[in-house]
Structures are given as structure tokens and as C-alpha cells.
């Protein structure tokens, strides 16, 4: 193994990190109470949660902290899940749905507290989360608003077309639903801050240390790495879209799904021609976009979810064209950087939390949820290991369902996304008619 640290993929986040600490690779055999595999926010939250509860933990990451989806996403933090709240109520009933939604609200609050408690000054919080509607149906948002307030106590505000178009200068959006509790931030700086906080509480973290072989039988587990090994009483696997066949049961229960992101050049006064609010914004399409303003008057624009795991050759052009299709006044805008990342998507679109063998835990399946769900998962698994807390069982309905295999599953997922895009176009077309 090379002693040269792995590099982050080129992105706005990698260019603006403030903590350049390169942690060592593991070159020995060590013992620990719990070994956490995966240095994304799910793994980091688990490790920190364990340390805060007095459990010795070691975390290994195949590349760098936050190298995967945790450090490349839109940076949105809000309650809820990728699966719709209405479907969760159908699946679980009203009371259990309330319980897990409350856990996601608690996770949003915990992230805020950790930013303040650990003094993460390089992770400024920008309040406000907005969903915008790309078809003309004001009753759609009114029904959503009333449902979320009745079931979960979520307070939100409907913005009519006239008010919305004063701040988002486009005729593509018809109405909006604004929630003050959500926010956005720099996800890679936050992940690095949580890593530092975990180390400050005794967690050992090794980068450039992939798990290459697992012996998970018996009371002591063995995790083999290229130049070392870890013996642990318990193991938490938190690998997401980059699990790459490490553990067959988990690898078969998640699909790597790609999403694309671009950040524009600094726009100066042109920004006000298009976007006049600082909120985290996403549209309500089944296969939609998300965007926000970041430092220097840049726009971060994401979307185009796909099961194809290679970036298009003209990714930057593709994404800026997408942006201009919504804000044509920005024609000619240049991309400063564009990138893709792989998320781990279960078939059911809900977090996968639990213990699938004695002393072997999983904390994954966070594609499409935003940043809060990873913190929720880490807290529940840490509490289960340290305190016997069984709240993770609230998610047991959404288990390790087989995706159909890497090839067949990817084909099925891609066909589903194309179907979603068709439905979106038809619905928007009816509004334009």
C-alpha cells in the first residue's frame, strides 16, 4: 500500500475544506470493542455515539473521511426520509410512523447542537428548506402541508406563485412549501469535524485502510486490511454505495445509485437575476433537482439520479444546461467544477439498521434522505450496542431486501427512474397546456 494519502475527488467541497489532516493507514494488528467500517457520516456518527457512551471504537475508511456520498452531496439537512411520509404511514401505521419521524427531527437538532458544541466554525448553518412545485396544482402542497402538521406537527408555509417568482425568477416553478426547521451546510467540513470530535473522545481512525476480508464468526471478529488487522467484539458496517461486495448479505441489499452535482463560477450580480433566497431548495418531481447558493455567489445544482455509475463525458455541460433550462437568464454560465457520487439505495428507500448476525451490525441505505438520517442511524446503533436500546427495531419492517443482483437490479432501477421522468414530463406538460 502506498503511503501517499488518497485524494478527494475534485469538487467544490474538496476545494473548500478547512481541515487537511491526513490520518494514517493501519499497519499493525490491534484490538477494540467495536470496529466501524466506513468513514462516511453514518460510520462517524456511530463511532462518536459509541465514544460518548464509553465504548472503545476504531473506525477504518478505505480512502478519506467523507470521501463518498457524505462529502459530495447537496448538503441538505431536514427531517424525513426518501420514502414518502404517506407511504411510511401505510407501511407502519400512524403511531410507529410518528416515532420514526420524531427520531429524524431529533437528528436535525443533534446536528445543530454538535456544530455548536464542537465549535465547528467552518460549518455555517444556513436556515430554510423549500420544496418547489413544477406543475400547477396548489392543492397538492396544501394537502401535504395539512398531512405533515396533523401527523407529525411539522409547521410549514405555502408560498403562492406570485411570491415565489419574486425570489426564484423562473416560470418553471408554480408554488412552494417553506419549512424553517431545515437548513444546509458544508457536508465534508461537517464530516471532518465529527471525525475530530470522535478522536477527541478516544476513537482511533485510520484512512486508506479498506477492509479486504472479514471473519465474522465467533465471539471475536477479525477485520483484515492490506497491512494490518483488527480484532473486535462487535462490527458495524456502514459502507453505502461503495460497499463493493465486502459483505454478501449487505452488498445484495443495496444498489449503488449515482447523482450529479455542479457548481457554477461566481455569478456576481447575475445571481440576483435568478435566485434571491439563501434556502436549500428542491423540486417535488419524482426525479428532481436540488440547489442552493454557496460561497462566492455560486449556485450548487444537483440531480439526474441514475443507476449508471460512470459520469457522462460532458457532465459539466449537461448539468449547466439543466440549470439554464430552469433559469434561462443564466445562459452562458460556466461550471467551476462538476462531480458525481454513489449513494446506497435499498429497494424500499428506507434506512437499513440492525444486527444481521451475532455482533455484526449494519447502518446503511441512506441514499436520498439528506444528512439527518445518517446521524439518526449512527445514534440508534451506538445506543443499541452500548445500552441495549432497541429503538432501531422501529425500522425492522424495512430490512435487507435483495435488490435482484448488481446487473438486474441496476437495470430495474434505471427503468424505474426513466418511468419517473416520463411521469414528471407528462404532469408538467399538462400544466403548460
Image (cartoon, rainbow, N blue to C red):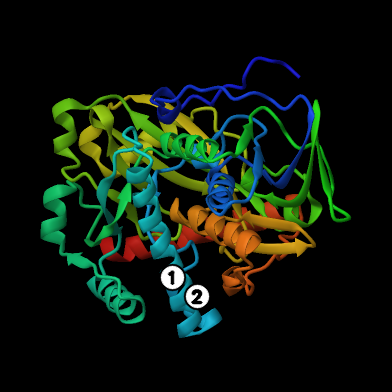
- Which quadrant is the N terminus positioned in? top right
Residue at the image position 36 percent from the left and 35 percent from the top: 321
Q: Are marks 2 and 1 in contact (CB under 8 Å)?
A: yes
Q: Nearer the viewer, residue 396 or 55?
A: 55
Image quarter for residue 91? bottom right
Q: Earlier in the sequence, mark 2 or mark 1?
A: 2
- Residue 289 appears in view: no
Q: Residue furthest front?
A: 54
Frontmost of labels 2 and 1 is: 1
Q: Position of residue 57 (x, y in %)?
A: 65, 44
Residue at the image position 15 percent from the left and 52 percent from the top: 165
Q: Position of residue 316 (x, y in %)?
A: 43, 29
Say what secondary structure mark 2 lies in.
helix
- Which quadrant is the C terminus positioned in? bottom left
Q: Residues within 10 Å of mark 1 (few under 14, many from 20)?
A: some
Left/right of residue 320 with respect to residue 253 in the rendered view:
left
Q: Residues within 10 Å of mark 2 (few under 14, many from 20)?
A: some
Q: Which residue in the protein does label 2 denote?
A: 88
Q: Which residue in the protein does label 1 denote?
A: 101
What whole-number distance in Å separates the C-alpha atoms at marks 2 and 1?
A: 9 Å
Q: Position of residue 250 (x, y in %)?
A: 73, 55
Residue at the image position 69 percent from the left and 15 percent from the top: 3
Image quarter for residue 204? top right
Up-down: is 54 above or below 293? Answer: below
Amino acid at each position: 500500500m502506498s503511503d501517499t494519502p488518497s485524494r478527494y475527488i475534485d469538487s467544490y467541497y474538496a476545494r473548500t475544506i478547512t481541515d487537511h489532516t491526513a490520518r494514517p493507514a493501519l499497519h499493525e494488528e490491534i484490538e477494540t470493542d467495536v470496529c466501524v467500517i466506513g468513514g462516511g457520516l453514518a460510520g462517524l456518527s456511530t463511532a462518536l455515539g459509541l465514544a460518548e457512551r464509553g465504548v472503545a471504537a476504531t473506525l477504518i475508511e478505505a480512502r478519506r473521511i467523507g470521501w463518498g456520498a457524505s462529502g459530495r452531496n447537496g448538503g441538505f439537512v431536514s427531517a424525513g426520509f426518501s420514502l414518502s411520509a404517506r407511504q411510511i404511514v401505510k407501511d407502519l401505521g400512524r403511531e410507529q410512523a410518528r416515532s420514526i419521524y420524531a427520531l429524524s427531527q431529533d437528528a436535525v437538532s443533534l446536528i445543530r447542537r454538535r456544530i455548536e458544541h464542537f465549535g465547528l466554525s467552518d460549518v455555517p448553518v444556513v436556515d430554510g428548506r423549500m420544496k418547489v412545485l413544477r406543475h400547477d396544482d396548489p392543492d397538492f402542497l396544501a394537502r401535504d402541508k395539512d398531512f405533515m402538521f396533523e401527523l407529525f406537527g411539522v409547521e410549514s408555509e405555502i408560498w403562492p406563485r406570485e411570491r415565489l417568482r419574486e425570489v426564484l425568477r423562473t416560470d418553471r416553478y408554480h408554488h412552494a412549501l417553506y419549512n424553517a426547521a431545515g437548513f444546509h451546510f458544508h457536508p465534508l467540513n461537517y464530516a471532518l469535524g465529527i471525525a475530530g470530535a470522535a478522536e477527541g473522545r478516544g476513537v482511533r481512525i485510520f484512512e486508506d485502510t479498506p477492509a479486504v476480508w472479514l471473519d465474522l464468526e465467533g465471539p471475536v471478529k477479525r477485520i483484515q486490511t492490506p497491512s494490518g488487522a483488527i480484532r473486535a467484539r462487535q462490527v458495524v458496517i456502514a459502507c453505502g454505495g461503495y460497499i463493493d461486495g465486502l459483505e454478501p448479505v449487505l452488498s445484495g441489499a443495496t444498489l449503488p445509485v449515482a447523482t450529479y452535482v455542479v457548481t457554477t463560477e461566481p455569478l456576481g450580480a447575475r445571481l440576483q437575476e435568478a435566485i434571491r433566497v439563501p434556502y436549500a431548495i428542491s423540486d417535488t418531481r419524482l426525479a428532481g433537482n436540488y440547489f442552493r447558493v454557496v460561497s462566492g455567489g455560486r449556485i450548487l445544482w444537483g440531480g439526474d439520479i441514475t443507476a449508471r455509475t460512470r459520469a457522462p463525458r460532458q457532465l459539466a455541460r449537461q448539468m449547466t444546461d439543466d440549470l439554464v433550462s430552469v433559469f434561462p437568464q443564466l445562459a452562458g454560465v460556466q461550471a467551476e467544477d462538476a462531480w458525481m457520487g454513489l449513494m446506497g439505495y435499498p429497494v424500499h428507500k428506507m434506512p437499513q439498521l440492525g444486527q444481521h448476525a451475532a455482533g455484526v451490525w449494519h447502518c446503511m441505505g441512506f441514499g436520498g434522505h439528506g444528512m439527518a438520517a445518517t446521524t439518526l442511524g449512527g445514534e440508534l446503533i451506538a445506543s443499541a450496542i452500548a445500552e441495549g436500546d432497541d429503538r432501531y427495531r422501529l425500522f425492522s419492517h424495512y430490512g435487507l431486501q435483495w435488490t435482484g443482483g448488481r446487473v438486474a437490479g441496476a437495470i430495474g432501477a434505471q427503468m424505474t427512474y426513466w418511468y419517473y421522468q416520463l411521469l414528471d414530463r407528462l404532469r408538467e406538460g399538462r400544466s403548460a397546456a
